[in-house]
Image (tube, grey):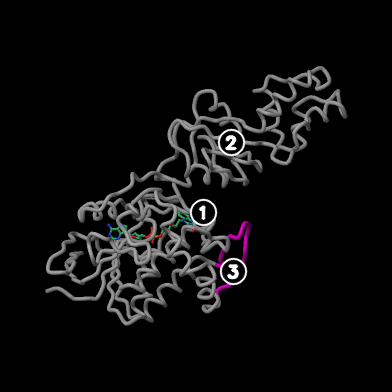
Amino acid sequence: MSETFDAIVLGAGAAGMMCASAAGQRGRRVLLLDHAPEPGRKILISGGGRCNFTNIHTAPDRYLSANPHFAKSALSRYSPQDFLALVERYGIAWHEKTLGQLFCDGSARQIVQLLLDECAQGGVTLACGDAVRTVDHADSHFRVTFGQRTARAPALVIATGGPSIPKMGASGFAYDLARQFGLKVVQPRPALVPLTLSGEDALFRELSGVSADVIARCNKARFREAALFTHRGLSGPAILQVSSYWQRGDAVGIDFLPDRAPGWLIAAKRARPRAGLPAVLGEALPERLARALAERLDQSGELGAMQDKALAAIEAQLANWRFIPNGSEGYAKAEVTAGGISVAELSSKTMEARRVPGLFAIGEAVDVTGWLGGYNFQWAWASGWATGQAL
Ligand SMILES: Cc1cc2nc3c(=O)[nH]c(=O)nc-3n(C[C@H](O)[C@H](O)[C@H](O)COP(=O)(O)OP(=O)(O)OC[C@H]3O[C@@H](n4cnc5c(N)ncnc54)[C@H](O)[C@@H]3O)c2cc1C
């Protein structure tokens, strides 16, 4: 026997819970399904356990998508202030860490509890722990079998996220389902992910644990944040940010001294001709990094013995040190998945598939990927809310 609902939401993560609660509170009978034993597991591990739940600088240009305009509608109708108002209504203490990133003072579990309470207020039926076995569509209804049960509804929401961090139950299920209904999928790839180095660049791995405030560039992207050397290559916020724009073969350029004005090295030579490059670099960079850069530049002598032209060339190299990563650490370490269900298939207002009435896709499953810093949860809330209004 099958149970009937107004909508079935697949995936009790950030987007799915927001969508289910919004629809439930509008009087819809909603079934929210997840194969994991508990809802919101990525929320629990997010932001180092404190959940960077939004970013007050949210704007459409902080998202990657084949159609950069797609996210505008949903983001404008459910803003960071809307989610913050909800957080405050629940008395959850929060703080801005940096760059507009809002975190819980306490635990990410408070955000999961907020969403569960919101779902309960909407009378949402939550079913966790059973894998979805089949999904089909007939007589204007979607039929979902999971565990030993069957449910049907005129609306089905794909909110099962992307494949990043498979050990948390993440999967490419959203794409399989989208393809089953004839929707295009933009080639998914790991994003917000550490990059790996080989060959000459691999020498930098000896700096594992060293970090510096840099400008990292890749293609048109440019981020000023910390970069971290790791035993496999490069990480830290600046690198995670540019990784979303990186494709195999692309160079990542690093400005190791973003605050130094052009000509600074020549000025240093005039002021301290006896000083060596490692010492001068060490005034602005961690000592190990300063030494390693000077070594690779093959400069161990005094600045006074070097020609201005050579110093200008060194400056230029330090301002755009080119690494050619040989790969990334993949889905196992990627904070998000870029690509996904093509936005060309969806209404930007409701997230409903144009070709399959009643089918919706939200959150990370869709080809909309935010920067690091709370932008991805804001997309999950905004897209979930948009669909919640349409069910
Ligand atoms: C370590 C880490 C830290 C992060 N920190 C932040 C942060 O601080 N701020 C930020 O904005 N973003 C952060 N993110 C990104 C953020 O977690 C995601 O963008 C967001 O969770 C996407 O929401 P979603 O609901 O689309 O997908 P998810 O939250 O991934 O939810 C998808 C749900 O679907 C379920 N599911 C998957 N496959 C199936 C299936 N076959 N059947 C049934 N259910 C299924 C999963 O179990 C899961 O519960 C972080 C990600 C990671 C990995």
Check if residue 296 falls in the magenta segment.
Answer: no
Tag 2's secondary structure?
Answer: loop
Verify CB contact (< 8 Å) between mark 3 and mark 1. Answer: no
What number is the disc on residue 208?
2
Q: CA distance from mark 2 to mark 1?
A: 30 Å
Q: CA distance from mark 3 to mark 1?
A: 23 Å
Picture coordinates of residue 207 (x, y %)? 61, 33
Picture coordinates of residue 153 (x, y %)? 21, 72
Mark 3 surroundings within 10 Å by alpha-carbon count, few (fewer than 14), some (14 through 19), many (20 or more): some
Picture coordinates of residue 47 (x, y %)? 52, 58
Task: Judge from the rendering whether residue 112 lies leftward or rightward of residue 221; answer left or right.
Answer: left
Q: Residue at x 75, y 20 (%)?
A: 309
Between residues 54 and 148, which one lies in front from this camera angle? 54
Q: From this viewpoint, which residue is outermost toward the front?
A: 69
Task: Judge from the rendering whether residue 218 lies leftward or rightward of residue 213; answer left or right.
Answer: left
From the image, tell me which residue sits under label 1.
62
